[in-house]
Amino acid sequence: MKYLARLILFTILIFSGGCLSIPRQIKKKIADNTTRATDEAIKGSPKLQELNKICTDIPLPDDFVFEEKYLLTVGLNENLTYSYDSKTAFNESRKIFEDYFKEKDWRVRDMSDKYPPGLDFTDGNVNVSVGAESIGDGFAYTIYCKRLEN
């Protein structure tokens, strides 16, 4: 009986308005710390500085809200990932990305038939993937940038 009472109390606390903001605050703090650590890693690496410039020069729809930047190490490669929230659906924003990379003569691979839908761009040395996933009344975008050589 004590277990059931605790379970009910816990459930009420989780679903009450005040407690729902705690996970959001924790998520925001983690994202801020991750972004800060990634910025420090970028400062110390000319390769990451170049990759960061490529990926931050990409034009974004006006309503994109930056959420997080993080460094992902796969083998010897260091890759950068940028997360954004937006109200703009992927089928509307894709033209901005396609036009930008086509103008720069990057190869474009359409992955809008995949889930989540996306686009993949390559110039021979760098690969940039843009993906979007529907969340609530908006979209979570990810821009993933990686070098193709070690």
Image: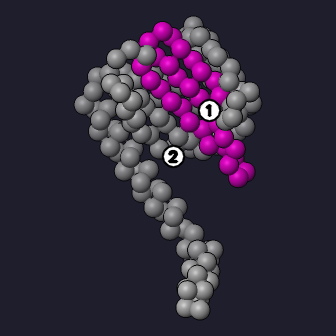
Is 148 or 68 nearer to us in this picture? 148
Q: Are marks 1 and 2 in contact (CB under 8 Å)?
A: no
Judge left or right: residue 58 versus residue 148.
right
* In the depicted structure, whether residue 104 falls above or below residue 2: above
Point out residue 123 in the picture as x, y percentages from the top left corner.
51, 11
Determine whether the residue tagged by mark 2 lies in a helix, strand or loop. Answer: strand
Amino acid at the residue labelled 2:
Glu
- Magenta region: 118-147
Q: Which mark is residue 67?
A: 2
Q: Which mark is residue 34?
A: none
Q: Is residue 56 visible?
A: yes
Return the residue at label 1: 131
Is 33 or 66 nearer to us in this picture? 33
Point out residue 77 in the picture as x, y percentages from the top left corner.
36, 25
**Residue drawn at the location 56% of the way across and 41% of the way down:** 84
**Residue drawn at the location 52% of the way across and 23% of the way down:** 128
* In the depicted structure, whether residue 30 falls above or below residue 120: below
Q: Nearer the viewer, mark 1 or mark 2?
A: 1
Q: Earlier in the sequence, mark 1 or mark 2?
A: 2
In magenta stretch: residue 139? yes
**Residue drawn at the location 55% of the way across and 74% of the way down:** 19
Q: Main secondary structure of the magenta part?
A: strand
- Give the alpha-carbon distance from disc 1 to disc 2, as whole Å: 15 Å
Amino acid at the residue labelled 1:
Gly
Q: Is residue 93 visible?
A: no
Quadrant position of residue 9:
bottom right
Q: Residues within 10 Å of mark 1 (few under 14, many from 20)?
A: many
